[in-house]
Image (cartoon, rainbow, N blue to C red):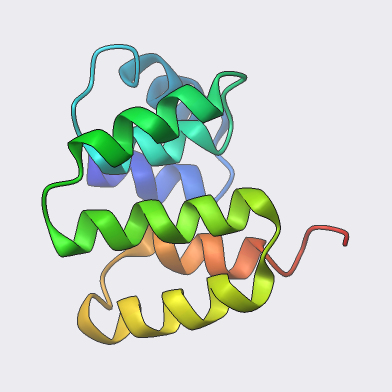
């Protein structure tokens, strides 16, 4: 699944579709969060991710994505920076942090 996340962050439409499809049955907070960034039912996916987030890493991911979806760029920056210190391999969080600055205010 990590390969799919890598493909998603580089804009691969097939990866986006596969992640959204996987979110229908997945219990992986990372898949649910990734899908929530693109799917029409993003709020429901975020709620599922929050309910399934059992680790600090997953809870931080959910918080970062939620802040991103609300357009809270400064909060995304702060949370992502802290998260990436402990989890520098989290490509999705790095992508969210960058994407939060590419969207119009």
Counting the numbered discs, the total is 0
Q: Quadrant of the C terminus?
A: bottom right
Q: Is residue 55 left or right of residue 74?
A: left
| Residue 46 image offset from top left, x and y in percent | 43, 35
**In the image, residue 95 lies at what x, y percent?**
51, 62
Along the viewing direction, whichever of 12 and 5 lies nearer the viewer: 5
Residue visible at 44% across and 22% down? 20
Task: Answer left or right for 99 relative to 81.
Answer: right
Point out the image quarter for the N terminus: top left
Point out the residue furthest to the right here.
105
Q: Is residue 77 left or right of residue 101?
A: left
Q: Quadrant of residue 86?
A: bottom left
For residue 55, what is the image quadrant? bottom left
Q: Is residue 53 above or below residue 68?
A: above
Q: Quadrant of residue 27?
A: top left
In the image, 68 versus 97, the foreground residue is 68
Q: Nearer the viewer, residue 7 or 70?
A: 70
Residue 104 x/y as whole percent? 87, 59
Residue with the most extreme left position: 54
Q: Nearer the viewer, residue 1 or 103?
A: 103
| Left or right, residue 41 beside residue 81 | right
């Amino acid at each position: 699944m990590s390969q799919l996340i890598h493909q998603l962050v580089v804009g691969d439409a097939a990866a986006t579709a596969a992640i959204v499809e996987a979110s229908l049955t997945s219990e992986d907070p990372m898949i649910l969060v990734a899908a929530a960034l693109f799917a029409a039912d993003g709020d429901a996916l975020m709620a599922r991710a929050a309910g399934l987030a059992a680790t600090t890493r997953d809870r931080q991911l959910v918080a970062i994505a939620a802040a991103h979806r609300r357009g809270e760029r400064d909060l995304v920056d702060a949370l992502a920076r802290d998260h990436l210190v402990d989890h520098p391999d989290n490509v999705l969080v790095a992508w969210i942090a960058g994407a939060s600055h590419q969207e119009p205010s």
